[in-house]
Image (cartoon, helix red, strand yellow):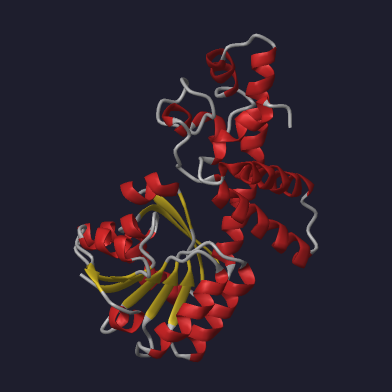
């Protein structure tokens, strides 16, 4: 059993912390939102009134925060309240540069650090089946792996500081692009009089197969567990997909990479969000294509 502090107990952090409790760890949590903190307490997380209280006595600290600026604001307070050699894991999805700055802060404080963003959405967080993409030293990864295994199904060490974030934004750029392609294909099939099931039966077992169709099909019917069968309740919200696509484009600009499809996907999801769909599952973008964008 480990003593773990968990900072950020929202839609992802809450169930992740709950799984750490289920695995037998002692978890103390903090979140700025009182209702969120109360919900976490009901799963066995010990509530703290501020960050320094949450991390006091912790062997490992996990953060799950919205943006890089929040991580860079929270980590100095965390690092000032913990002894050297404590492990700090950031599971937020943020830009690579902010992740590297956080690692530098930890190194200066004599602490171990890991950037370990996740894939799998709220369903994976609740089920404990997330994929973790980790960046940091071998020592940090080895120490973090047993903790991450209580929350996820696949743990991948992607490289040094910032590599986890790099893998995350590349993966989600693929996802955003592929979902748009799948949605366009289903809309075309509808216009051509082809049933959803017929297209799924062909594409899911031939060259068109991908996660966006086989696991997360954007039309109701073929994949009963997909959000399309639940009025597009996320899942993975369109606003979060847009955030990740924008991170990919920031990284592409800074690195000089050419990502024309990633850029187009970001523009389409920006339009979808502008139409009031940010809180819906990202696969609901199929409705925008039906309206002839």
Q: Quadrant of residue 27?
A: bottom left
- Judged from this view, the residue extending furthest toward the top is 193
The C terminus: image quadrant:
top right
Nearest the viewer among 249 and 53 is 53
Nearest the viewer among 272 and 99 is 272
Residue 226: x, y in percent?
45, 32
Q: Going by the image, does 88 lie left or right of 135? A: left
Does residue 161 appear in the picture of this structure? no
Q: Going by the image, does 231 lie left or right of 36? A: right
Relative to 288, say whether 146 is above or below. below
Does residue 138 appear in the picture of this structure? yes
Relative to 112, say whether 114 is above or below. above
Relative to 239, say whether 54 is above or below. below
Q: Going by the image, does 203 lie left or right of 156? A: right
Relative to 174, say whether 69 is above or below. below
Q: Going by the image, does 94 lie left or right of 8? A: right
Q: Which residue is rendered at x = 54% and y = 66% of the image? A: 67
Residue 251: x, y in percent?
70, 63
Residue 85: x, y in percent?
38, 86
Q: Which residue is rendered at x = 51% and y = 41% of the image? A: 280
């Amino acid at each position: 059993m480990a003593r773990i502090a968990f900072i950020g107990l929202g839609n992802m952090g809450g169930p992740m912390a709950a799984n750490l409790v289920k695995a037998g760890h002692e978890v103390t949590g903090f979140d700025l939102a009182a209702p969120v903190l109360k919900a976490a307490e009901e799963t066995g997380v010990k509530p703290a009134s501020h960050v320094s209280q949450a991390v006091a006595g912790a062997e490992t600290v996990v953060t799950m925060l919205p943006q890089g600026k929040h991580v860079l604001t929270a980590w100095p307070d965390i690092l000032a309240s913990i002894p050297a050699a404590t492990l700090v894991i950031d599971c937020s999805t943020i830009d690579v540069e902010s992740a590297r700055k956080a690692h530098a802060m930890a190194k200066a404080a004599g602490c171990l650090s890991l950037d370990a963003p996740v894939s799998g959405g709220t369903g994976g967080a609740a089920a404990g089946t997330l994929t973790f993409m980790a960046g940091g030293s071998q020592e940090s990864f080895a120490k973090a792996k047993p903790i991450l295994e209580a929350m996820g199904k696949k743990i991948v060490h992607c490289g040094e500081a910032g590599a986890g974030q790099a893998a995350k934004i590349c993966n989600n750029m693929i996802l955003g692009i592929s979902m748009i392609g799948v949605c366009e294909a289903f809309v075309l099939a509808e216009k051509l009089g082809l049933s959803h099931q017929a297209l799924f039966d062909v594409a899911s077992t031939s060259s068109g197969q991908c996660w966006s169709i086989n696991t997360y099909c954007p039309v109701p019917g073929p994949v009963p567990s997909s959000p399309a069968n639940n009025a597009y309740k996320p899942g993975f919200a369109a606003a979060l997909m847009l955030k990740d696509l924008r991170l990919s484009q920031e990284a592409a600009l800074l690195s000089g990479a050419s990502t024309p499809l990633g850029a187009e996907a970001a523009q389409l999801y920006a339009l979808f969000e502008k139409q009031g769909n940010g809180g819906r599952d990202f696969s609901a973008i199929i409705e925008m294509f039906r309206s002839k964008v």
